[in-house]
């Protein structure tokens, strides 16, 4: 049987690295979601300005789901 010595410093470093990787992954997901919403809002504003559509007309054209419209409307 081989016994190995527990290395607390190595364990701490490993845990920190795993935590950082998890944090970066979560940050990427959040960033993509924010970017997606920002793009939708920009597209709605663009349609409202260039086509002279109402907010609801622009959302209809972009096929924004009803359950998302209230949250998006608050950003316009």
Image (tube, rainbow, N blue to C red):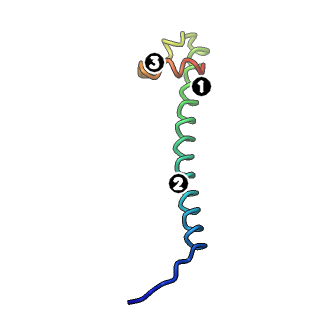
Mark 3 vs 1, N-terminal side: 1
* Nearer the camera: disc 2 or disc 1: 2
Q: Nearer the viewer, residue 44 or 23?
A: 23
Percent across and percent down for residue 67 are 42, 21
Label 3 belongs to which residue?
61
Q: Nearer the viewer, residue 14 or 65?
A: 14
SS class of the residue under badge 3? helix
* Quadrant of image for the C terminus: top right
Q: Residues within 10 Å of mark 1 (few under 14, many from 20)?
A: some
User: Where is 23 relative to 70, above or below?
Assistant: below
SS class of the residue under badge 2? helix
Percent across and percent down for residue 59 are 48, 18
| Contact check, label 2 and label 3, Cβ < 8 Å | no
Q: Residue at x 52, y 54 (%)?
A: 22
Could you give the CA–CA distance between mark 2 and mark 1, rounded to whole angstroms? 30 Å
- Residue found at the very far left of the displayed protein: 1
Could you give the CA–CA distance between mark 3 and mark 1, rounded to whole angstroms? 14 Å
Could you give the CA–CA distance between mark 2 and mark 3, rounded to whole angstroms? 37 Å
Asked whether residue 72 appears in the rendered view, the answer is yes
Label 2 belongs to which residue?
22
- The numbered dot on residue 42 is 1
Question: Quarter-wise, where is residue 64 in the image?
Answer: top left
Asked whether residue 63 appears in the rendered view, the answer is no
Q: Residue at x 53, y 27 (%)?
A: 40
Q: Nearer the viewer, residue 30 or 23?
A: 23
* Nearer the camera: disc 2 or disc 3: 2
Question: Quarter-wise, where is residue 39 in the image?
Answer: top right
Q: Residues within 10 Å of mark 3 (few under 14, many from 20)?
A: few
- Residue found at the very far bottom of the displayed protein: 1
């Amino acid at each position: 049987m081989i016994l190995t010595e527990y290395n607390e410093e190595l364990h701490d470093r490993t845990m920190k690295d795993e935590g950082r990787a998890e944090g970066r992954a979560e940050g990427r997901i959040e960033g993509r979601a924010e970017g997606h919403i920002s793009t939708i809002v920009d597209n709605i504003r663009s349609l409202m300005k260039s086509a002279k559509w109402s907010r609801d007309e622009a959302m209809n054209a972009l096929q924004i789901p009803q359950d998302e419209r209230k949250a998006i409307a608050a950003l316009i």
